[in-house]
Image: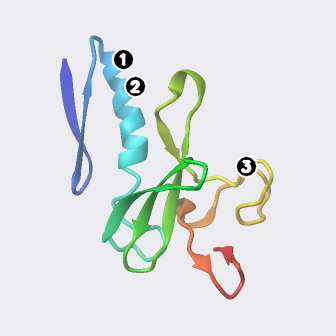
Amino acid sequence: MKVQVKVAPRVFVEADGKTQTEIFESLASLQEVFGSFSECGKCHSDDLRLVVRTDNEDNKYYEIHCRKCFARLAFGQNKGEKAGTLFPHVRENKKGSIMGLEPGSYLPDGGWLRWNKQKGKSE
């Protein structure tokens, strides 16, 4: 059985499964990622693009970039059983090093960050 759902104004996702619970879990995971980018959390523009960056050690970084204000929403990669799936970075990491907030606290603007060149950090 297949189910297709509209998760954002211009995004449809499709899940396939043998049971409703399988499909529900797939749709929930897809919606968490692909429903996260209907608009920028900083300027509310809908002029967005998906970006995959690779560093010198071949690590991949999955992000959504706003073409208007240059903010970005980063995604983490799940490990173990859920390897190959993503989740939006909406919380401060365990070391509190993204914005210097309390570890585990929610980031402002739904996790959308913009680099402040003058301050040398993301805001």
Q: Nearer the viewer, residue 81 or 20?
A: 81
Query: How far apart are labels 3 and 1 at the CA level?
Result: 29 Å
Residue behind mark 3: 104
Q: How dense is the environment of label 2, judged by Cα within 10 Å: few (below 14), some, or many (20 and up)? A: few
Residue behind mark 1: 21
Quarter location, residue 29: top left
* Image spot of residue 67 (x, y percent): 37, 75
Q: Are discs 2 and 1 less than 8 Å apart at CB?
A: yes
Q: Are discs 3 and 1 less than 8 Å apart at CB?
A: no
Q: Nearer the viewer, residue 83 or 100?
A: 83
Q: Residue at x 46, y 76 (%)?
A: 70
Q: Secondary structure at mark 3?
A: loop
Q: Secondary structure at mark 1?
A: helix
Q: Residue at x 19, y 23 (%)?
A: 2
Which residue type does callout 2 highlight?
Glu
Which residue type does callout 3 highlight?
Gly
Query: How far apart are labels 2 and 1 at the CA level?
Result: 6 Å
- Residue 23 position (above or below residue 44): above
Residue behind mark 2: 25
